[in-house]
Amino acid sequence: DIQMTQSPSSLSASIGDRVTITCQASQDISHFLNWYQQKPGKAPKLLIYDASNLETGVPSRFSGSGSGTDFTFTISSLQPEDIATYYCQQYDNLPITFGQGTRLEIK
Amino acid sequence: QLQLQESGPGLVKPSETLSLTCTVSGGSISNTSYFWDWIRQPPGKGLEWIGTIYYSGSTYCNPSLKSRVTISVDSSKNQFSLKLSSVTAADTAVYYCSRRTFGVVSWLDPWGQGTLVTVSS
């Protein structure tokens, strides 16, 4: 299985801050990576697909980049509604695997 | 707009079989552009992908669970189902169903709201 390692596991930031989360794959997965946002008690929501493509309707302050084994997810200016846990997910090989999640809190 | 809804018992006894159904509305489960997946999330923990089924009935299950998992599809009812046998407390989780695109680029969207299954006597 491909292991996905996210860092940090938790993050505290202020409104308006630039926030960056990284995801590292245990082997080359090209661009086959997605990012999801999960709010408490809710199902995950797709934000970024294919490493860098913004899902329709998702605010442009969210972005993704990277390829191979190293990927980055960025919120350019943190908003109160962005408080959630974020997961990366690879689909290069089955089984699909997720990162352990990054919990984002307001400072 | 496609919607998915999980249903099934919220409480299962240890060693028994967990059975869940996902009902798809607003679209056909026989659409050749999609797979249909199950994912679970233990309380307070991360996401674990369980397995997938195509409308034809072809399946792939996570090797970590493979011997205990059965995924099936009923196109006439626009539903797909999950059975997990010999459950233990470690199988307590919120279980989600989702649609996954078929192609080089693939993602899980939308998701059902999830259903909590507790394994306890």
Image (tube, grey):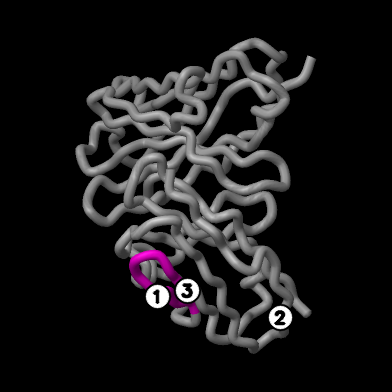
Instruction: Inspect the image, locate mark 3, and give the three-letter code of the amino acid beneath it.
Output: Thr
Instruction: Inspect the image, locate mark 2, and give the three-letter code of the amino acid beneath it.
Output: Ala
Magenta span includes B94: no
Instruction: Residue at 69% x, 55% y: name it.
Output: A40
Instruction: Residue at 54% x, 41% y: name it.
Output: B48
Secondary structure type for disc 3: strand
Q: Chain of mark 2?
A: A
B80 vs A30, nearest the viewer: A30
Give the number of the mark in front: 3 or 2: 3
A58 vs A70, nearest the viewer: A70
Name which of mark 3 and mark 1 comes first in the sequence. 1
Q: Which residue is mark 2?
A: A13
Q: Residue furthest bottom?
A: A16
In the picture, measured across the screen, residue B2 lies left or right of residue B19, that is left
Secondary structure type for disc 2: strand
Q: Which residue is mark 3?
A: A72
Instruction: Residue at 56% x, 15% y: name it.
Output: B85
Q: Chain of mark 3?
A: A
- Whether the residues at callouts 2 and 1 have beta carbons within 8 Å, the answer is no
Marks 3/2 same chain: yes
- Whether the residues at callouts 3 and 2 have beta carbons within 8 Å, the answer is no
Label tally? 3
Q: Which residues are magenta?
A: A62-72
